[in-house]
């Protein structure tokens, strides 16, 4: 291209500005990180915090930049630094030192010295030029704020000189730059004097843009800004503007241009009213500007300090003071009203676009304007809330800020989701309209040099070749070259003496700016979202970020928007720069930790609300328990019999369900409030299925699921109300009612959030069937097992409770010391079924195993007693037909009572187990009737000749389903572990010992049989179950004949009991008939013995007479 009129410094201006701006941001990032590192004692270079080096560092700073290492006066350096490795100093400080060198190099070539005709038509050129000026200014200001810069540079240079014998070659220039820019703005004001014209022209070109953007909320409202439905007839018309790129240009960016620009070319404020107007408007809008991230610049103080030393600037200083007062008094409320307007405007926009996403095509400009406006207001609030300069802070606390951020995220989501819709629209727009209009404009140019004509023609050709099919085929578009060509064209046509002046052809400029916006809608939607709505600045305001989140959760009406905070964490990585890769991990970790914390807190809050609802529902369910109806029945009976109540004026008890009766729709209960708050929060948790933060995927619903699992687990265990000190525990039926109420509430959560609550139930309830849960904590299985064994059954052993077969329950006996609980309320059929529902087959199996462990310990003790009496028992086993000899041998036996007591305890435990098994069978028959009937059928049809191992497997299956078995597999397993010599003989003699000991029970006053309970008050009726089960288990283990051994037992027992019929001592035989009945019970209980066999050993007439006697005795006792 022939560029004879272009000065060398102005060639490749577009490329230079693009590269310098990007490099400037990278330099800012590095300098910012150095400042933060030096401000943190943990991250600061160790040489700067070492107390031994303090004097040397101070010396270097005081003499900076002139440090002569060979001077006698600097021996202090040698003394302090002689022990240090100079190469280590160079290595550790190199990154800092060469960053400062890069800043110096950037400053040298910081911006192209160009005289351009700035205007809104050459938008890219003006924007990049002003951006570069601001970036340069910001860079030098932040550099001047690094207090340790002189120490770092001086120490590095000292180490370099001591190592290489000479200063670093960049050191003199670098040291001078640091000194020159002690007060960076003052230095730059002098530096920019030659460039005041080009800078002021660029700034004054904002007079058509900035005032229009910086309007009050009322003006926005009157203009119905951002509204798609205010003019329905024009809803499908494309949103157009003569200054398309300026419409979504950040207000924050413009204010920085104006403030820093007019500080650098301040002379124009005295000569140009438009410049002064812009300057005042910017000063009235804010009290501080964002330099970079959380570094701020206090406008009024800095400007006043700079202008105070300039002669004739009193009027400007007064302007600054007036603007400061205006900003302090009105800016806060103005921005608050803007945020209020934007909340409603963005909500309307998001709602309409969600319903009609096709409008994203013609109204894309509105979306990016809305995002940019909202982003400006959020950043303004964040910056000023952290740097409040007035006493009243109300204007800087916005509890509804989450709502505004949420609608921004909603608009961003629409753009990402419906990107192809926008692409289709703008591809057709570019090829069908823009290309035609641009071609006409180019044809009508009076002067168009060949090179410019070629570029223009390439634009037209590029757009004409576009088609919708490319979008449908998923082709990747790239218009960056076209946009750079337009940038170049702006640079060429904006210089003085250009043959084609852009200022003279504004229509062409406006059209090209519109076309550039349209190309971005096709290939740069993600970049546009970052440009207009990136809120990664929150990464550097962690405390304010967390505070906003807490405020959002505390306000029920705002909690539905709380998901915007984790979504903002996805923005953080966009603030990183390739020139500072070392901060990626730090920012990435911060984004992950914040996102995790936010989602965790949201889930906790939802969990707490759910827990409160569950508590309320459990209270309501509790009111329906049978125990609460007694009073109601009593009142009804009293009313019927017209008896006077005990207390006058006693209020009538409210019936369950009263809480559902509403006299007024406005009446709101606590439960209503909880449900409302929960639905709002669940909306937020359910808003996105997952979100990706720094290549990590977060699933909000999983946080809620895990918290619900933990809380449900704790709640179930808590609802048992187990008190170890007093051994109190909730009744299984009451716990089951509460758990069902809890589960009903949890199931309703599926109406709010798409989670699998069944998975929660399975995880939690299955863990509760084990001894310990996944966290190693006790479960309801372990608590109830422990309580039944250590409290209920221990009291049975102590004689305070008896097992009543007629009631199928354990019942308290009248004793001197009343028990703290009623055994019947914990062991009747309904309670045992409730226990089976709660513990399930696994939990009941654990309960059985625990019971069997206790039985095995009793059997072990019994075997010891057998061993002690082995000789006597051996003789008795073969002498049962010699009464006199048997009597003599019996007197030699020891621990007879202990054997019977231990066997009774075993019988009690087995009776409790049979209750538990029966309850389990009933429960499973309701839940899985077909499976239970199949198992039962399988058990009932085992052939007699089946191998015992196979039979035991079937019995184990049957036992797990709660079915009674001839041989108890759990008992077999428990007793199998006991091994000693002559085990089989001991087992046989144990049965002998029990058989010959039975007559002694007749002398016990508590051995009286009660027909009402179908048992004995001292639980000896449980011996029947104990004898049968123990015999079956022992002789299964030792492969003996169970039937033969039980026949032997029956012969010995009947022989022994027949002898007490001949006794004359009434004390010895007081309950003879009651003991006779044990033989009948043993046979009835046994699957191996028959009544015919009993008849051969023990006359049935005695049994009949015994039953008659005990029933007669019972009637007389009752009478």
Image (cartoon, rainbow, N blue to C red):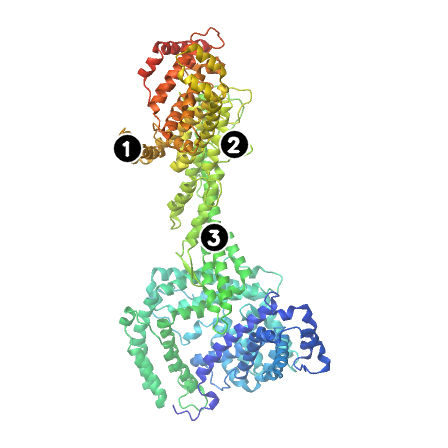
Neighbours of disc 3 within 10 Å: few (<14), some (14-19), many (20+): many
Left/right placement of residue 184 relative to residue 891 reads right
Is residue 1118 visible in the rendered image? The answer is yes
* Kind of element beneath mark 1: helix
Work out which residue is located at the far bottom of the displayed protein and give it: 4
Q: Which mark is residue 602?
A: 3
Question: In front: mark 2 or mark 1?
Answer: 1
Residue 1045 place in picture, x, y as percent: 36, 22
**Residue at the location (64% across, 70% down)?**
48
Out of 626 and 36, give the one closest to the viewer: 36
Residue 1116 place in picture, x, y as percent: 44, 8
Out of 1108 and 309, give the one closest to the viewer: 1108
Q: CA distance from mark 3 to mark 1?
A: 52 Å
Q: CA distance from mark 2 to mark 3?
A: 36 Å
Residue 1037 place in picture, x, y as percent: 38, 30
Q: Earlier in the sequence, mark 2 or mark 3?
A: 3
- The residue tagged 1 is 938
Out of 265 and 560, give the one closest to the viewer: 560
Q: Is residue 504 above or below residue 855?
A: below
Q: Is residue 397 above or below residue 249?
A: above
- The residue tagged 2 is 728
Q: Which mark is residue 1035?
A: none
Question: In front: mark 2 or mark 3?
Answer: 2
Residue 405 place in picture, x, y as percent: 46, 61
Residue 325, by quadrant, is bottom right
Indicate the quadrant containing the C terminus: top left, top right, bottom left or bottom right: top left
Q: Earlier in the sequence, mark 3 or mark 1?
A: 3
**Residue at the location (48% across, 37% down)?**
719
Indicate the quadrant containing the N terminus: top left, top right, bottom left or bottom right: bottom left
């Amino acid at each position: 291209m022939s560029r004879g009129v272009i000065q060398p410094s102005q060639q490749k201006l577009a490329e230079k500005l693009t590269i310098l701006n990007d490099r400037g941001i990278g330099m800012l990032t590095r300098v910012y990180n150095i400042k933060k590192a030096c401000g943190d004692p943990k991250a600061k270079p160790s040489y700067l915090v070492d107390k031994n080096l303090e004097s040397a560092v101070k010396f270097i700073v005081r003499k900076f930049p002139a440090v002569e290492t060979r001077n006698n006066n600097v021996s202090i350096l040698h003394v302090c630094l002689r022990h240090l490795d100079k190469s280590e100093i160079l290595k550790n400080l190199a990154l800092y030192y060469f960053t400062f060198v890069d800043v110096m190099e950037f400053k040298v070539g910081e911006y192209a010295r160009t005289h351009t005709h700035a205007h809104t038509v050459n938008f890219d050129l003006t924007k990049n030029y002003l951006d570069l000026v601001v970036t340069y200014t910001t860079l030098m200001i932040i550099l001047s704020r690094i207090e340790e810069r002189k120490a770092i540079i001086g120490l590095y240079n000292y180490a370099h000189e001591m190592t290489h014998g000479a200063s670093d070659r960049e050191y003199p220039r670098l040291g001078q730059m640091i000194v020159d820019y002690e007060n960076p703005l003052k230095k730059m004001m002098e530096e920019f004097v030659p460039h005041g014209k080009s800078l002021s022209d660029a700034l004054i070109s904002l007079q058509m843009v900035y005032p229009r953007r910086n309007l009050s909320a009322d003006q926005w409202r009157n203009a119905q800004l951002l509204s798609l439905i205010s003019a329905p007839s024009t809803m499908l018309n494309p949103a157009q503007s003569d200054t398309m790129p300026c419409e979504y240009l950040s207000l924050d960016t413009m204010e920085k241009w104006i403030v820093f620009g007019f500080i650098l070319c301040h002379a124009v404020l005295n000569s140009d009213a438009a410049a002064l107007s812009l300057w005042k408007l910017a000063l009235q809008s804010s009290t501080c500007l964002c330099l970079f991230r959380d570094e701020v610049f206090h406008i009024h103080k800095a400007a006043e300090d700079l202008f105070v030393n300039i002669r004739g600037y009193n009027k400007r200083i007064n302007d600054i003071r007036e603007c400061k007062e205006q900003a302090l008094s009105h800016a806060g409320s103005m921005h608050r009203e803007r945020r209020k307007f934007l909340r409603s405007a963005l909500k309307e926009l998001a709602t309409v676009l969600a319903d009609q996403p096709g409008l994203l095509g013609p109204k894309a400009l509105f979306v990016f304007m809305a995002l940019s406006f909202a982003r400006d207001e959020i950043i303004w609030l964040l910056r000023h809330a952290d740097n409040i300069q007035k006493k009243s802070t109300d204007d800087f606390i916005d509890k509804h800020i989450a709502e505004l951020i949420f609608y921004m995220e909603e608009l961003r989501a629409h753009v990402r989701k419906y990107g192809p819709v926008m692409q289709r629209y703008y591809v057709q727009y570019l090829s069908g309209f823009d290309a035609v209009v641009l071609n006409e404009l180019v044809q009508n140019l009076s002067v168009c040099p060949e090179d410019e004509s070629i570029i223009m023609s390439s634009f037209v050709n590029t757009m004409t070749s576009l088609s919708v099919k490319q979008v449908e085929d998923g082709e990747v578009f790239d218009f960056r070259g076209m946009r750079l060509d337009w940038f170049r064209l702006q640079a060429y046509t904006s210089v003085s003496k250009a043959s084609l002046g852009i200022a003279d052809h504004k229509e062409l400029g406006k059209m090209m700016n519109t076309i550039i916006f349209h190309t971005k809608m096709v290939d740069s939607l993600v970049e546009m979202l970052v440009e207009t709505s990136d809120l990664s600045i929150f990464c550097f305001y962690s405390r304010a970020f967390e505070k906003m989140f807490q405020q959002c959760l505390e306000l029920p009406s705002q909690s539905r928007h709380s998901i915007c905070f984790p979504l903002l964490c996805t923005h953080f990585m966009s603030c990183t720069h390739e020139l500072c890769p070392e901060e990626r991990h730090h920012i990435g970790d911060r984004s992950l930790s914040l996102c995790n914390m936010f989602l965790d807190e949201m889930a906790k809050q939802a969990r707490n609300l759910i827990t409160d609802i569950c508590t309320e529902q459990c209270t309501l369910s509790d009111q329906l328990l049978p125990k609460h109806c007694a009073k109601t029945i009593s009142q009804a009976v009293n009313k019927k019999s017209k008896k006077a109540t005990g207390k006058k004026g006693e209020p009538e008890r409210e019936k369950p369900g009263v809480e559902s009766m509403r006299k007024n729709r406005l009446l709101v209960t606590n439960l209503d409030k909880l449900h409302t708050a929960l639905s709002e929060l669940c909306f937020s948790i359910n808003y996105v299925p997952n979100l990706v933060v720094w290549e990590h995927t977060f699933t909000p619903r999983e946080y809620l699921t895990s918290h619900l699992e933990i809380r449900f687990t704790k709640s179930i265990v808590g609802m048992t109300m187990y008190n170890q000190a007093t051994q109190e525990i909730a009744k299984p039926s009451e716990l089951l009612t509460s758990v069902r109420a809890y589960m009903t509430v949890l199931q309703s959560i599926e109406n709010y959030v798409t989670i699998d609550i069944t998975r929660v139930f399975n995880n939690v309830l299955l863990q509760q069937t084990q001894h310990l849960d996944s966290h190693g904590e006790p479960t309801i299985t372990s608590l109830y097992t422990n309580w039944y064994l250590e409290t209920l059954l221990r009291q049975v052993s102590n004689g305070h409770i008896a097992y009543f077969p007629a009631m199928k329950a354990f019942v308290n006996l009248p004793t001197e010391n009343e028990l703290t609980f009623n055994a019947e309320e914990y062991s009747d059929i309904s309670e045992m079924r409730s226990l089976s529902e709660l513990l399930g087959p696994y939990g009941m199996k654990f309960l059985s195993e625990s019971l069997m462990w206790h039985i095995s310990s009793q059997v072990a003790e019994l075997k010891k007693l057998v061993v002690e009496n082995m000789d006597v028992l051996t003789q008795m086993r073969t002498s049962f037909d010699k009464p006199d000899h048997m009597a003599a041998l019996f007197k030699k036996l020891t621990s007879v009572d202990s054997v019977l007591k231990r066997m009774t305890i075993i019988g009690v435990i087995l009776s409790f187990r049979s209750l538990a098994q029966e309850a389990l069978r009933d429960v499973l028959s309701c839940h899985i009737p077909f499976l239970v009937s199949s198992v039962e059928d399988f058990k009932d049809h085992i052939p007699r000749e089946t191998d015992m191992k196979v039979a035991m497997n079937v019995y184990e299956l049957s036992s797990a389903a709660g079915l009674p078995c001839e041989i108890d597999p759990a008992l077999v397993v428990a007793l199998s572990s006991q091994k000693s010599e002559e085990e089989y003989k001991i087992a046989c003699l144990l049965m002998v010992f029990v058989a010959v000991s039975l007559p002694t029970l007749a002398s016990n006053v508590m051995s009286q049989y009660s027909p009402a309970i179908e048992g004995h008050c001292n639980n000896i009726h449980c011996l029947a179950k104990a004898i049968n089960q123990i015999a079956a288990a022992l002789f299964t283990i030792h492969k003996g004949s169970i039937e033969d051994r039980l026949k032997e037992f029956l012969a010995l027992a009947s022989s022994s009991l027949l002898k007490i019929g001949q006794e004359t001592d009434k004390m010895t035989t007081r309950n003879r008939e009651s003991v006779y009945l044990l033989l009948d019970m043993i046979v009835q209980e046994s699957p191996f013995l028959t009544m015919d066999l009993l008849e051969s050993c023990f006359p049935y007439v005695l049994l009949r007479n015994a039953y008659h006697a005990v029933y007669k005795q019972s009637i007389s006792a009752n009478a």
